[in-house]
Image (tube, rainbow, N blue to C red):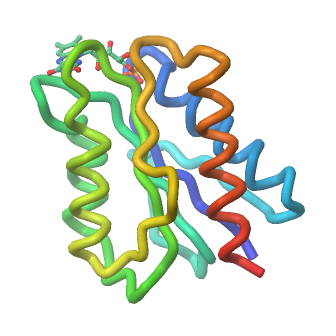
């Protein structure tokens, strides 16, 4: 059992969120893999999925856009979105909608958004998302 966390980040902020999500997953005794969008090579039997991007010009970053465009149908896979933003923060909502359109089951507490660098409360929300995803894997 493995939770997959795929992200794209320009300055490391969404990356920090991805790592905190995996901390939450692992705290529940479930394995977790953080993968940069440009290295994404499929779900590989993941039991749950988180996808994150910061917001650029009201959109997701391009490699996450590509990951989502090429994503297989998710058939009820538990999933959630996340991302850092500066002022409007559309990307996590866009990702949630796309995951839902692919057939994912969105877990409670998502999408998680963090303004600029995630503060301790935002990182805790990320860990909570990780725990929620892990709970769907048993
Ligand atoms: C060219 C550019 C465009 C941006 N556009 C938006 C935007 O439309 N809405 C928003 O909320 N933040 C916007 N931001 C802010 C980033 O989302 C923010 O800096 C975020 O913390 C970066 O996170 P990252 O390090 O994970 O990429 C923009 C930043 C840059 C450099």
What residue occupies the far front of the structure in this picture? 108
What residue occupies the far bottom of the structure in this picture? 75
Image spot of residue 57 (x, y percent): 10, 24
Image spot of residue 123 (x, y percent): 63, 28
Q: Quadrant of the N terminus?
A: bottom right
In the image, 115 versus 70, the foreground residue is 115
Is 25 positioned to the left or the right of 59 in the image?
right
Image spot of residue 87 (x, y percent): 23, 14
Residue at the spot 67% in from the left edge and 46% down from the top edge: 128
Q: Is residue 25 above or below residue 123?
A: below
Residue at the spot 65% in from the left edge and 60% down from the top edge: 132
Q: Where does ligand 1 appear, by image quarter?
A: top left
Image spot of residue 61 (x, y percent): 24, 35
Q: Quadrant of the C terminus?
A: bottom right
Residue at the spot 43% in from the left edge and 14% down from the top edge: 11
Is 129 positioned to the left or the right of 10 in the image?
right
Give the image quarter of residue 137. Answer: bottom right
Give the image quarter of residue 71. Answer: bottom left
Give the image quarter of residue 114. Answer: top left
Q: How many marks?
A: 0
Residue at the spot 21% in from the left edge and 40% down from the top edge: 62
Q: Is residue 115 above or below residue 105?
A: above
What residue occupies the far left of the structure in this picture? 57
């Amino acid at each position: 059992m493995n939770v997959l966390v795929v992200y794209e980040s320009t300055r490391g902020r969404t990356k920090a969120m991805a790592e905190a999500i995996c901390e939450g997953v692992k705290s529940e005794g479930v394995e977790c893999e953080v993968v940069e969008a440009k290295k994404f090579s499929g779900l590989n039997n993941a039991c749950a999925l988180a996808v994150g991007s910061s917001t650029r010009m009201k959109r997701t970053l391009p490699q996450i856009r590509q990951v989502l465009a090429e994503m297989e149908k998710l058939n009820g896979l538990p999933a959630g979105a996340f991302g850092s933003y500066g002022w409007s923060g559309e990307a996590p909502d866009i990702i949630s909608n796309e995951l839902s359109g692919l057939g994912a089951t969105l877990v409670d507490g998502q999408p998680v958004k963090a303004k600029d660098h995630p503060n301790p409360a935002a990182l805790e929300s990320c860990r909570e998302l990780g725990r929620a995803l892990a709970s769907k894997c048993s």
